[in-house]
Amino acid sequence: MTGDTFAWSLIAIVGSLLLASWLLVRRGLGPRRLVPLLALQWLAGAALLLFLFPPSVRIGGGSLTVVTSPMAAGPTGNVVSLPEAGNVPGAKPVPDFAAAIADVPAGTPIELLGLGLVERDRIAITNPLRFTPPPQPAGITAITLPEPTAPGAGFMFGGQASGLAGGTADLLDPAGTRVANVPIATDGQFRLSGTAPVAGTALFTLVARNRSGGVIERLAIPVDSRDPTPPRLLILAGAPSAEVRQLRRFAEDAGIDVTLRVDLGAGLQTGDAPVAIDRATLARTDLLVIDDRRWERLSGGERNAIVAALSGGMGLLLRPTGPLPAGVRRDWASLGLAVSGGDASLPVRLDDTPDSLPLARRNFSMGGANAVTMLRDSAGEAIAAWAPRGRGRVGLMSVTDSYALTLTGAPQRYSALWSMIFSTLAREGEPAAPRLSALVRAGGRGAVCGLAEDARLLAPDGGVSRLLIDRAANDCAAFWPQQPGWHVVRNAKDRETALYVHPANAAPALAAAQRREGTLALIGSPSTDAAERSAPGPRWPWLLLLLALIAPLWWLERQRVSAA
């Protein structure tokens, strides 16, 4: 019943009792009859109220003990054991925690014995939970596995150990040779580094030792070294120049895959192998650098291919070398960058430092509805700008002799200048490779995150399973590997990423720590329902009390009538 029902019922009963008491007083009865009648009436009213709204009582009784890990001697009473506990004497085996509490009344206390609940069993319940975690076993309790790296590059990882303060952490390479050794701090923290081997996957080994040098635990450390995909640069020039030669040298030194084609006129070209300026070529190009003279010689189909590639994400840098013809101005304005002026060459300094060298630039004014200034000179004038075009960007650089920086002792400024331009305009790189959210063991649940598109998981035995991505959860997908070893995530573009699944018994101290923390978090975060439930108690005791009070009240009333 609701609170309103109780309130109105209380008002009605109290009002009736007050009226009856007033009528009894008006009759002028003596104290020996008035007092018992008034007392019995009020007691009967209270009994009636308790009969209508009996006090609440707690539901459930007793307790349930759930054994979560192997125990030498089983507890007594109402005991069940989860699969991780094995055969526990005196305990009823159940397949999971949900089955263990399926028939348990709400409000019944549940005590967890052992290491705690595995991830499968961490469900919100309304019953009160009791869990006293056992001492944490010595070993590795936290680990951050290394990120994929380039072949021959360094990698780092760290972790924490329990009960090993003063001990050491060793890193062994795939051949078993120790490559790093660090002490474990008093708080258990340690950090190790190594060098990745040739391209491919490799398993290093982390060895945790105690203070006396004894080996407490070994853990495989997977390292995935892959050759990075270099940016692809295409330079088209209308004539040979020192600026073009230096730009190519800079790109090669930076590890960029560069292709240079210089038009000599009369159908002659020099540079790298000829390339077709078509949609297929430009789809593989991250940045196209072209000057005004080469632009003027493009065919209509080549211009259309460049516009389409811009919409698909390619970057384009327009490089004027002199006064622009009217047709080139119109074409560049249609791409989003309107230019005016440019008939003269002006001196320019990139900054105000004393050793700043004067360069030359065309006196362009760059604008457009969506134009963004990319670089200014020491006087605040824009010397480079860009504008969006589809998923790509088109930029313009008015400096014509930046190569002079390298000839006059400022190669760092040259590199910084063009690195900024390339990184601003070039097509976005490949998305980060998928990664595991935590250490995964065979037979358990794993989560691979950073999936940009539908992907498949290839197991070591060749089995293939599709990964269902949850976009609302950091683009992660859950999977349940049944075998240890290297698994492969293959996306729709056949790009592959190697992921390592540890054996089921790997890192026992880490597994114990995860179960401990997960179970304590479950107890500390109860569901929104009350942990203990109650319900209205039985009505029959209050009915008997009401009848017991009404009987003498009726007898006294009969006596008063007979006396009258």
Image: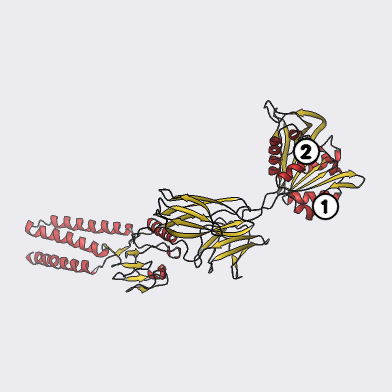
Q: Residue 404: x percent and y percent?
A: 76, 33
Residue beneath label 2, please?
A: 338
- The reply, left or right, for residue 69 in relation to residue 228 is left
Q: Amino acid at mark 1?
A: Val
* 337 sits left or right of 36 in the view: right
> Residue reaching furthest top?
354
Which residue: 76% across, 39% down?
396
Q: Which residue is mark 1?
A: 275
Crowd class of label 1 (few under 14; some 14 to 19; many from 20; radius 10 Å): few
Residue type (three-letter) at the residue carrying disc 2: Ala
Disc 2 on helix, strand or loop? Answer: strand
Pick out the residue farthest to the right: 266
Quadrant for residue 48, please give it.
bottom left
* Towards the viewer: 60 or 76: 76
* Up-down relation of residue 497 to residue 91 (above or below): above
Place residue 557 in its image quadrant: bottom left
Badge 2 density bin: few <14, some 14–19, many ≥20, Cα 10 Å: some
Viewer can see residue 110: yes
Q: Earlier in the sequence, mark 1 or mark 2?
A: 1
Question: Residue 53, image x and y in percent?
Answer: 27, 62
Asked if 445 appears above or below 299 in the picture, the reply is below
- Which one is nearer the viewer's eye here, 511 or 315? 511
Q: Is residue 531 left or right of residue 273?
A: left
**SS for callout 1:** loop
Name the colouring of the figure: secondary structure
